[in-house]
Image (cartoon, helix red, strand yellow):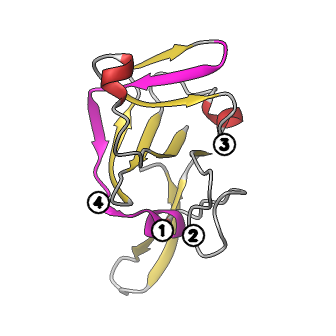
């Protein structure tokens, strides 16, 4: 499973609060809890940075769960999209109650889960654009 998570609070450092390698956390009262509480080792977490760029995708190497929280840890970068979050959302067709129809995060957005990517890729020889599905 893949997750797109808003790590946009400049004043919250996950490693300071949860230890080395902590990249994201979510509490039970926050948006996205129902999906994110199922995160597992081996999943990929993409983080929206404070500048609203999806900089990196991390392979989850450890999950710490409590009754009302989940913290994910990683030291493995597996992707570096380096694109605005709106572009990421549109490119991969992500939908959620806290994502507007034009791809903007709405107040309270924290995390959305998605299984696969749908991207645009050039077809061989013709140069035409075709849809392609599959994990990245």
Q: Residue at image x 44%, y 37%?
A: 44
Tell whether label 2 touches label 1 (CB within 8 Å). Answer: yes
Please tell me whether mark 1 or mark 3 is closer to you in this view.
Answer: 3
Residue farthest to the front, as pictured: 11
Q: Closer to the observer: label 4 or label 3?
A: 3
Q: Secondary structure at mark 2?
A: loop
In the picture, measured across the screen, residue 21 lies left or right of residue 26, that is left
Q: Determine the secondary structure under disc 3.
A: loop
Question: What residue does disc 4 label?
Answer: 82
Is 18 rendered above or below residue 8?
above
Residue matched to label 1:
86
Range of residues picked out in magenta: 67-90
Separation of residues labelled 1 and 4 (CA atoms): 12 Å
Measured as percent of width and height from the top left, residue 90 is found at: 53, 69
Identify the mark nearer the N-term, 4 or 2: 4
- Image location (x, y in percent) of residue 66: 60, 12
Residue that carries the numbered disc 2 in the rendered image: 103
Question: Distance of mark 1 from mark 3, alpha carbons?
Answer: 18 Å
Q: Which residue is mark 3?
A: 31
Circles 1 and 3, Cβ within 8 Å, touching? The answer is: no
Question: Badge 4 local density, few (<14 within 10 Å), some, or many (20+)?
Answer: some
Above-or-below relation of 42 to 57: above
């Amino acid at each position: 499973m893949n997750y797109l998570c808003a790590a946009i609070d400049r004043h919250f450092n996950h490693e300071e609060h949860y230890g080395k390698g902590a990249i994201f956390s979510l509490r039970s009262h926050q948006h996205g809890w129902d999906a994110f509480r199922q995160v597992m080792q081996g999943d990929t977490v993409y983080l929206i940075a404070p500048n609203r760029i999806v900089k990196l995708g991390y392979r989850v190497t450890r999950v710490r769960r409590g009754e009302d929280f989940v913290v994910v840890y990683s030291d493995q970068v597996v992707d570096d999209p380096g694109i605005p979050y709106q572009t990421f959302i549109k490119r991969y067709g992500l939908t959620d109650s806290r994502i507007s129809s034009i791809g903007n995060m709405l107040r309270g957005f924290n995390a959305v889960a998605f299984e696969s990517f749908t991207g645009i890729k050039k077809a061989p020889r013709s140069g035409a654009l075709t849809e392609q599905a599959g994990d990245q």
